[in-house]
Image: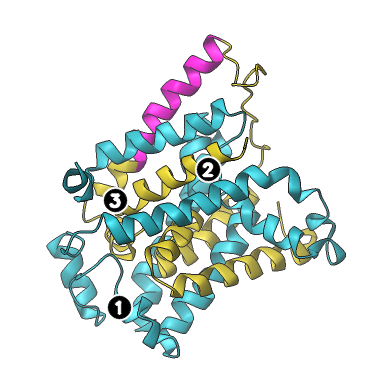
Amino acid sequence: MIEFISQPWPWYASGLAIAVVMFLLVFFGKNFGFSSNFRHFCAACGGGKYSKFFDYDWRSYGWSLLFLIGTVIGGWIAGNFLTTTDGVQISEATINDLGKLGIAAPTGLQPNEIFGIDQVFTFPVLILVVLGGFLVGFGTRWAGGCTSGHAISGLSNLQLPSLIAVIGFFIGGLITTHLLLPLIF
Amino acid sequence: MKGIKFIIVGILFGIIMAKSEAISWYRIQEMFRFQAFHMFGIIGVAVVLGAIGTALIKRFKLNDITGQPIKFTPKEMGWKRYLFGGTVFGLGWAMTGACPGPMFVSLGYGYWMFGLAIVMATLGTFTYGLVKDKLPH
């Protein structure tokens, strides 16, 4: 059993499982959206002193922070008990493209060139992790949601604003992938 | 403990995101290069099943476990915040290879650098809170 679930899961099983997670939260009387937690962090750290946007009762979103703690534990379980030795089986075309940027074929889940802890003071990593993280946090709140809130929950509810947001996600992602990454590396 | 169910669903979500490889920077690069179906398949199946389930919940007016009718809050109309904010998000998504959920899954998985990404994303959200009234929405 453990061996069976330790293999990388196929897309259809993963998509089904994500829908199940969304509906579990819905039946718990909540909603599936992850990025609001960054706002709750700001509110919990006293951000209300600086902007009314962070002046609200973040404790009423305790469930969301518990969900977040669960995802970290889930990642830890997967990383310690459900691992395989193979790298991510991405397509040959992607391996070739990334090779031109100096990123080797996968040997694990994430590239050591970017997420190896010894890389922390190199220029590309500073851009990708520091600037990238900042843009994710800024953009997701501006757009009012992230992949879970817009692409999954919003599109499931046939929301036009979510479709516009997802189009934006791809405009930005394509610019970074095809125009910025070759400049950064 | 009323809260324990949220931790359990979170654990489930974390395992799904890790084992589907949706948290992988490589997979996000593959997606933005349109070189495999994997990520589109994951999101596509989740959305199709999500849409069917959402329609059924509305059609049969189902209640949540506390007995309250389930409500789906529509997004505010408009396009500027979604297009501009979405684009900024996308720029960052292709850099970190992780949207907000996967950042936390990867941190738990043992990739400590995502702690830095999480701190920066929180700072990004904080900055948005400071300047939001000056941005188009």
State the extent of the magenta-drawn residues as a range.
B43-60
* Image-based side of A135 in relation to B91, left or right: right
Disc 1 crowd, CA 10 A, few/some/many (<14, 14-19, 20+): some
- Quarter where residue A19 is shown: top left
**Position of residue A63 measured from the top left corner of the image (x, y, whole percent):** 63, 43
* Image-based side of A52 in relation to A150, left or right: right
Q: Read off the residue under disc 1.
A: A112
Indicate the secondary structure of the residue bearing disc 3. helix
| Chain of residue at mark 3 | B
Q: Is residue B79 above or below residue A173?
A: above
Check whether the beta carbons of the residues at disc 2 and disc 3 lie within 8 A of each other.
Answer: no
Q: Read off the residue under disc 2.
A: A150
Q: Is residue B118 above or below residue A100?
A: above
**Chain given the colour cyan:** A
Which amino acid, by three-letter code, is at mark 1? Answer: Asn
Indicate the secondary structure of the residue bearing disc 2. helix
**CA–CA distance in space, label 2 to label 1:** 30 Å
Q: Which residue is pictured at 17% across the width and 72% down the height? A: A105
**Position of residue A136 measured from the top left corner of the image (x, y, whole percent):** 54, 63
**CA–CA distance in space, label 2 to label 3:** 22 Å
Q: Which residue is pictured at 74% across the width and 43% down the height? A: A60
Residue B55 located within the stretch drawn in magenta: yes
**Chain given the colour yellow:** B
Mark in the foreground, 2 or 1: 1
Q: Read off the residue under disc 3.
A: B19
